[in-house]
Image (spheres, grey):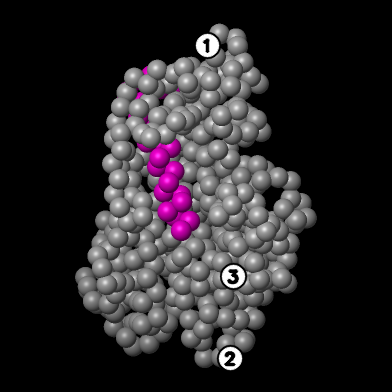
Amino acid sequence: MNDSKTAFKSREQLVKFLGIFSPHISKPTEKFVGEMLFGIQASQDTLLSEIGRSLREDIKLKKTEERLCRHLAKAGLDEKLHLGIVEDAKRFIGERTIISIDPTDIQKDYAEKMPYLDKVWDGSKGRVGDNLGYWCCMAVACENGCRRIVPLHLRLWSVKAPGYVSEGDEVQQVIMQVALATNKRGIYVYDRGGDGDVMFAFFLENALDFIVRLVGDRHLVDWGTRKVLARDLAAQCVLKYEDSVHFKSHNKVHNVRVQYGSMPVRLPDYPDRELRLVVVKWPKSEGRMMLLTTLEAVRTRESLWEVVQGYLTRWRVEDTLRYIKTSYNVEHVRVLDYQRLKNMAALIAAVAYFAAAWLGRQLKLGVLAEHIAKVSKRMFDVPEFFYYAIADGLKWLFVSHGKWRGPGERFDGKGDLQMELEFADG
């Protein structure tokens, strides 16, 4: 398959992809969403001027930018886009699928006129610092131990915006939309930010399975009736098993041996609900990692390792966040309206879902994804996390071969018409 055919097929798939949103949005809005998805992918940017420029319309760029800006202000568009994504993605989510939840941020230190800017996380300090921006929450589905990702949700908020309640409330809305679409299938994996009474109550009262990493001062009820600090219980846990963990860090592949074990525990607020505390000991580490889970069958080596590996699989969401921020220049976003910001985050989630999940869900589309990755013009081999190459390949194809053609506008020239006839002939 040459580059022209790959480009044509990719645009055709993007048109078909828009169909997942059709039940939730109007035809004019669907046309706008198509333009935005194509433009974000073709420009690998979130600036409206760059998105408009990539559409190459026969009108002034200012007119294109004004039209996109006007449609981007549509109230509730973010919820409708996320609904379309999770309803299509539910086919990928089984009872044991890992659904990683990870709050993150978008930094906008110099955008003084953007609405509701607030202090966000400073990675160098390990706390909220003086950096300005917005908070986000990413949800990504992945099979245990697998590298194939399914982006589900990217919600943006500001603590200064009207109607803001709490970070927990924002995260719960993300989880609930996914849970309703999937009939509560999947195992929700959350780092130490999920260790809170409100989040545990939310998971248990909605009958959602979870794996949450605990902080040391969390109180648990042991096998008797005593209330004990989690770190004290973890110190008493017998680590019966040992396995290898493979991971890549700083361009090096590491292979370490970890020890692990488990014990039955309960939460003080839910004394009748038995949970399992899974304890992991890393080499050269004095402390022990503590994972609280609802998975009741965590007693055998295989089931225990599933929990450990399930938590480690949540690193996929961090890979996904880096991929999205890098490939689509997310922190370049520059709009002066809060609803536009929230809608842009949902559009970025849709672009990521199209590139990472839609193109690979069938054998033929998986082959197409391989062709797209190969035309990314990389100097080295396609990396293991090859979604970067897919994003780069789609940009090259969309910019170099043909314009965007939305639903109902099948051909933009003789070349595309000839290509359609070739595909029809097999």
Residue at 47% x, 76% y: name it.
43
Marks 2 and 1: in contact by CB < 8 Å?
no
Residue 310 in the magenta stretch? The answer is yes
Residue 349 x %, y %: 51, 59
Residue 248 in the magenta stretch? The answer is no
Residue 18 x %, y %: 48, 64
SS category of the residue bearing label 1: loop
| Residue picked out by circle 3 | 333
Read off the magenta span. Answer: 295-322
| Residue picked out by circle 2 | 60
In this orientation, does residue 181 appear? no
**Amino acid beneath label 3:** Val
Q: CA distance from mark 2 to mark 3?
A: 21 Å
Marks 3 and 2: in contact by CB < 8 Å?
no
Vertical placement of residue 361 versus 97, above or below: below
SS category of the residue bearing label 2: loop
**Amino acid beneath label 1:** Trp
Q: Using the rendered view, name the quadrant where residue 25 is placed.
A: bottom right
Q: Nearer the viewer, residue 348 or 9?
A: 348
| Residue picked out by circle 1 | 223
Residue at 48% x, 68% y: name it.
328
